[in-house]
Image: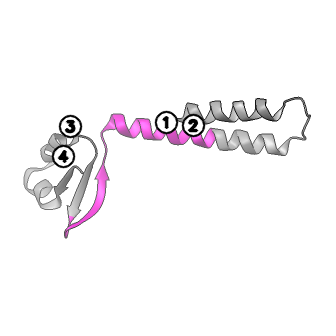
Amino acid sequence: MNVIPATEIKRRGVVALEECLKYGPVHIIKNNRPTCAVLSEEEYQKLKNQISKRKRAVFNLSSMLEKPATGKKTRKQIDKLFKEERDSWE
């Protein structure tokens, strides 16, 4: 885990965080406990996009459930569509 004490940030400023961010997300430690995490802008955007995709998938699923069944797709076809949707989240 990539950690930095809050006192180090107070002492050195944002430079200390920037150095740690080179190795991934940084957990800030205060009173010997992790209090928050800092992500690079790139990692934040990736996470934001993943959440957005999942929200759209949930919306699509709920929209599908509201429509009456037409019986045009087999269970195998539906399972394949769901698998493709889940795989696109990653």
The residue range painted magenta reads 30-56
Q: Which residue is mark 3?
A: 22
Image mark for residue 49: 1
Residue 72 figure quarter: top right
- Name the residue rendered at 71%, 38% in the picture: 60
Farthest residue toward the front?
76
Mark earlier in primary sequence (3, 1): 3
Q: CA distance from mark 4 to mark 3?
A: 9 Å
Image mark for residue 53: 2
Marks 2 and 3 close (CB-CB < 8 Å): no
Q: Which residue is mark 4?
A: 17
- Badge 3 crowding class, 10 Å Cα cut-off, few under 14, some 14 to 19, many 20 or more, is few
Q: CA distance from mark 2 to mark 3?
A: 27 Å
Q: CA distance from mark 1 to mark 2?
A: 6 Å
Marks 1 and 2 close (CB-CB < 8 Å): yes
- Name the residue rendered at 69%, 42% in the picture: 59
